[in-house]
Image (cartoon, grey):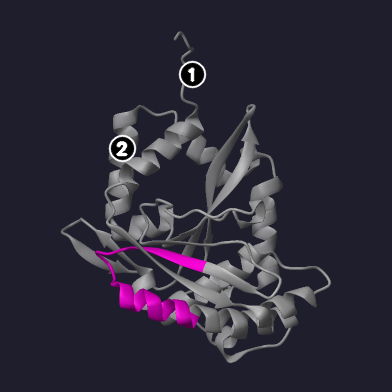
Amino acid sequence: MRGRAIKLSPSRRLVGDLMRFSIGVPRVTVQRQMNLAPLQQARMAQQSKTSWTVLFLKGYALLSQDVPDLRRAYVKLPRPQLYEYPVSIASVAHEREHEGERIVLLSTIEDPERRPLAEIEALFLAARSKPIHEIKQFRRALKFARAPGPIRWLLMWLGLNLGRQRGRRFGTFQLSVYSGLGAESLNPLTPLTTIFNYGPISEDGTVTVRIHYDHRVMDGANVARALIRFENILNGAIADEARGVASPETEAGAAVPGTRS
């Protein structure tokens, strides 16, 4: 059958490059059925409802403060070792329209544990609505995708295996969800230590939450305990912030040394 060849767009090359470095990560998944009724009630009481993505992202950042494993990465330079970051940098996937194609681009948010929910929401809105050429990370990524393959692969390999560079360029964890479309990903890939997602949230607040983790960095029992802690944070510190009530955890997060205000 005679078809047609379609040239890879810069965004498709970027996805291919990420998969090139993701496929070799020994990734394992742990999931937990959570009851987020307290957080759901706090959100419903808001005049302007915070998106679930923002609530989960800040909750995971607070979780990463408590669980150092989630701020670690397996790197190969100068030798195979674990590298631990003092704070989290979230990597978030955004679907955008560009040159007649739906594409996925990544943005990062530094120190989300210290940022108010409203500030994180504003960053999300900017990444999803501002023209792509006005967003430095998107503009730089598309320019990078036009470089020859061997150069891209070498630079990505170095960036992922130099501890200090890895966090700044790629983030420490990734969030990618489709729950707003009534679907959920069972096997997402990323070169980062963890990627987490969640399914559709029912009316009574139940939801399935998954952490997909690099087994070189941590073990399943630690992740299972982290999911319990994650549920408590979402129904505690995050629900309190959504209600406008200060909590000890959010106050502690604001006091992390070496982070910016």
Identity of the residue drawn at 46% across and 25% down: 8
Determine which of the numbered discs, if any, sits on residue 6 in the image: 1
For the C terminus, give its image quadrant: bottom right
The answer to whether residue 190 is visible is: yes
Instruction: Please give the range of residues in magenta.
Output: 209-229
The kind of residue tagged 2 is: Trp
* For residue 26, side relative to residue 205 (left or right): left
Instruction: Give the mark, 2 or 1, whose residue is nearer the N terminus.
Output: 1
Q: Is residue 162 above or below residue 226?
A: above
Distance from the alpha carbon under mark 2 to that under mark 1 = 22 Å
Determine which of the numbered discs, if any, sits on residue 153 in the image: 2
* For residue 77, side relative to residue 50 (left or right): left
**Considering depth in this image, is 54 or 235 the residue closer to the camera?**
235
Identity of the residue drawn at 59% across and 53% down: 183
Q: Is residue 212 above or below residue 243?
A: above
Q: Within 10 angstroms of label 1, few (less than 14), some, or many (20 or more) residues?
A: few
For the N terminus, give its image quadrant: top left
